[in-house]
Amino acid sequence: LQDAERASEAEAGDAARSFRQQYGAELDSDEAHLIALLQHVESINVAAAIESTGASKATPTRKLARMVERGLLVRHGQG
């Protein structure tokens, strides 16, 4: 995430609206922030999610796992 910028609140709001319209999926603010970040980078891992959101390790880990379970993200790799 060194080269990626933090997603702005406006981008997160736009991502949430877009997902709601396209997929009927509601996103909380953390999930919307992660989706907005993915518009700037090809993939995301927990370390990048922590850096971007400023949250503790547990929150991004839980959010990413929940998004995978809901089919909003596809997990690649081991960790």
Image (spheres, grey):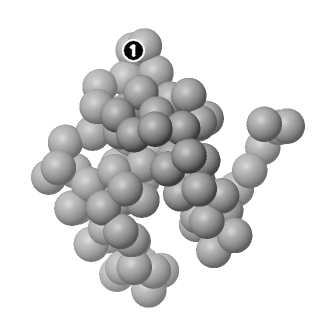
Percent coordinates x, y for residue 18 in the rendering: 32, 70
Q: Quadrant of the C terminus?
A: top right
Q: Residue furthest top?
A: 2
Task: Please indicate whether residue 40 sits to the left or right of residue 43 in the image.
Answer: left
60 or 20: nearer the eye? Answer: 60
Q: In the figure, 42 relative to 5: above or below?
A: below
Callout 1 amino acid: Asp
Q: The residue tagged with tag 1: helix, strand or loop?
A: loop
User: Is residue 58 shown to the viewer in this render?
Assistant: yes
Q: Residue at x 41, y 27 (%)?
A: 51
The residue wearing badge 1 is 3
Q: Residue furthest right?
A: 78
Q: Residue furthest bottom?
A: 24
Q: In the figure, 1 relative to 38: above or below?
A: above
User: Is residue 40 shown to the viewer in this render?
Assistant: no
Query: What is the quadrant of residue 17 in the picture?
Result: bottom left
Query: What is the quadrant of residue 7 in the picture?
Result: top left
Q: Residue at x 35, y 68 (%)?
A: 28
